[in-house]
Amino acid sequence: MAEVEFRGISRRFGDVQALHSLDLAVADGEFLILVGPSGCGKSTALRLLAGLDKPTSGEILIAGRPVTRSGPGERDIAMVFQNYALYPHMSVFQNLAYGLRQRRTPRAEVNRRVHETAVLLDIDELLDRKPRQLSGGQRQRVAMGRALVRRPQAFLLDEPLSNLDAKLRTQVRGDLKRLHREVPVTSIYVTHDQVEAMTLGDRICVMSNGEVQQIGTTDDIYNRPSNTFVAGFMGSPPMNLVPGEVRGGTVRVAGAALADLPSPDRPVTVGFRPEDLRIGGPWESRSVPARIDFCEPLGSHVLVHALVDADGTGPEGTPSNVIAQAPPGTAYDSGARVGFSVAAGKTYVFDAETGQAAPPPARDRVITA
């Protein structure tokens, strides 16, 4: 295992700046998630670390050793891709053993490490099979085993679950958590799926347009987002973000007073998560006015979609879409007028121009209905 560090790493492809001076340290044995939309630079960072591409500027270190100019084979890392990349003509045993044999590892040691890894990943009964005889989840386990059997300093995973169906993704996510607990190799996992990001990693690095937006634990990212991008990207459904204003030290949305914020009068963006909204009857002065659009019954709960300030009297005169999570059986007719109130301490305020979060006291002194 080893610490991994990016120091001022940039990568340009022609006129496109894929990474902007990335500074990031991954601790020895840590499981770090790089998450963000397509084109945000997360896979570029992983390829640079693997030695599959070269940075335009900056330095990469593994275990304190500069490897920026080293080839992939000199970095002692292993990578798992989304397409498994197994040799179809080889058995599972041969796929697992291939890297060790290339390094001229003694046969007894190869057998021992392959069987240990196979037992760890619950594929020990599949060693004689060819990849075509395996399910998608089994193939992914073999791909992970082929990387782990080498005992690398770092383990890189590039969207390894994207080809699996929903049930298998959940199962393999559990396998990965158990695996990292038992073999705590320094791991960097790339995904665009924020559910994977929040459930798997020790820390999450949220990226957009080649830049880091926030690094922290799941609790940090979900409950203390640094800006509107992080707030709107992380969470399923994501945080609701609507235009509002600070007037007289109070945060207001469509005339409703939601939070106390000692600040000059100014436009702001106000956020609240679906699970923190409560739906009342016809709106009152301290609840946000809205008009029901439609409802989505999901068994354990109902997602209520509505339009805030649907009569066009808000700061922009344009309705804002809002989603609330309601108990099972909740039903509203399309067009029904309701009021939303926000749970205490769950109003988020962001600067309307920069998108940056307002100071924490805005979230502590809430005046909900």
Image (cartoon, helix red, strand yellow):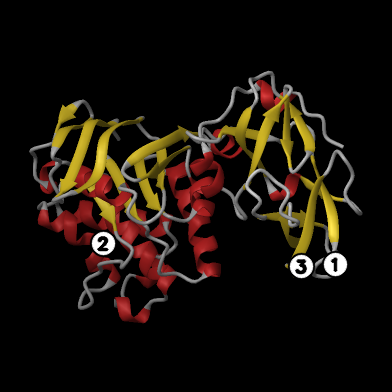
Q: Which mark is residue 96?
A: 2
Q: Residues within 10 Å of mark 3 (few under 14, many from 20)?
A: few
Element type at marker 1? loop
Amino acid, disc 1: Ala
Residue for badge 3: 299
Tell me the distance, in whole angstroms, between the alpha carbons under discs 2 and 3: 42 Å
Whether 165 is drawn above or below 71: the answer is: below
Give the quadrant of residue 107: bottom left
Residue for badge 1: 331
Give the quadrant of residue 319: bottom right
Element type at marker 2? helix
Residue 144: image location, x then y, percent: 34, 57
Residue 232 shown left or right of residue 99 in the figure: right
Q: Residue at x 32, y 54 (%)?
A: 39
The reply to whether the C-beta atoms of the residues labelled 2 and 3 are less than 8 Å apart is no
Residue 157: image location, x then y, percent: 34, 52
The answer to which of 43 and 73 lies nearer the viewer is 43
Residue 56: image location, x then y, percent: 13, 40
